[in-house]
Image (spheres, helix red, strand yellow):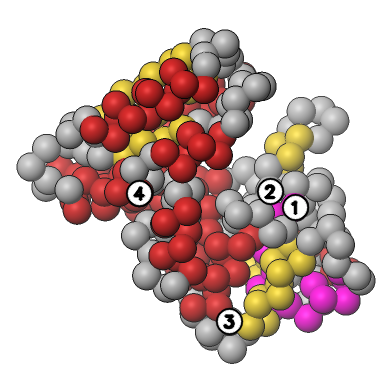
Amino acid sequence: MAVILDGAALAAKLKARIREEAGALPRPPMLAVVLAGEDPASQIYVRGKERDCAECGIRTRTHRLPADVSQRELSALVDRLNRDGDVDGILVQLPLPEGLDPRPILHAVSPEKDVDCFHPLNAGLLALGEPRFLPCTPAGVLELLDAYEIPVRGRLCVIIGRSHLVGRPLAQLLTARDGTVTLCHSRTADLPALTRQADILVSAAGRRGLVTADMIKPGAAVIDVAMNRDPGGKLAGDVDFPAAEAMAGFLTPVPGGVGPMTRAMLLRNVLQAADRR
């Protein structure tokens, strides 16, 4: 049976450390959150981030905007937050309402306050191996591997999903740790043949039940990044958890695996931004 990677417990330990370090700063860090529209999932995510920050001694200031906010108004708000000396980090909650282009908004966030690591400059620094911030979900995956002493060096790492949020930056981080990385996607031929070779298998495709037991190398570390809903509305990942548990050596649950770690890494980025400022 696989060892379950408890992201919730590890995140709680990290948050306690962040709270201690935040308390040692001259002033509490400040995260500004920009929330446009009434998307129910976004509302839940933002409330969760506000709670996380409060637990760690990080102040939040949430700017709630109507769904009909204009691109110009949103850009102007981001510009004000960039110039606000009390704001250490800026988070623009996605998705934005229909009709708004998120790219110029995300690119307008000051790189020094870009705690989500979406700005092209920060993405470029990551690619060069000189990151200002680590993207939250990939950083959370690395923390889980480290906590459970799962080595990366010399291991074959297969990632399913090539998004700029998870797959691509995680491939860069694993490569920097001397892992041999294969990045798979919807056009990959014979995906199971590749996943069966993986010592570390990460799935971030967003397809419930994609990874079955016969796609897993016995004893592999299987990291499920995805958050899907089953027909009953219950959260589920990409991995067939009951079947994978008998095959894998290490396995993340959904929920309670990578999700709490992603939120903890955001808090760490806000702390780092405040410390540098």
Examine the image and state in which quarter residue 2 appears: bottom right
Question: Label 2 amino acid?
Answer: Ala
Q: Quadrant of the N terminus?
A: bottom right
Cα gap from disc 3 to disc 1, whole angstroms:
21 Å
Q: Is residue 130 left or right of residue 118?
A: left
**Residue position for label 1:** 205
Q: Residue at x 61, y 62 (%)?
A: 168
Label 2 vs label 4, nearer the camera = 4
The numbered dot on residue 179 is 3
The numbered dot on residue 226 is 2
Q: Residue at x 82, y 76 (%)?
A: 194
Cα gap from disc 2 to disc 1, whole angstroms:
7 Å
**217, 197: nearer the viewer:** 197
Question: Label 4 amino acid?
Answer: Pro
Magenta span has 32?
A: no
Quick one: label 2, few (<14), some, or many (20+) residues within 10 Å? many
**239, 99: nearer the viewer:** 99
Q: Residue at x 57, y 64 (%)?
A: 170
Quick one: label 3, few (<14), some, or many (20+) residues within 10 Å? many
Give the residues in magenta.
191-205
Query: Of marks 4 and 1, which one's residue comes earlier in the chain?
Result: 4
Question: Label 1 amino acid?
Answer: Ala
Q: Secondary structure under badge 3? A: loop
Query: Of marks 3 and 1, which one's residue comes earlier in the chain?
Result: 3
Q: Is residue 78 left or right of residue 106?
A: left
**Residue position for label 4:** 111
The numbered dot on residue 255 is none
Quick one: label 4, few (<14), some, or many (20+) residues within 10 Å? many
Tell whether label 1 touches label 4 (CB within 8 Å): no
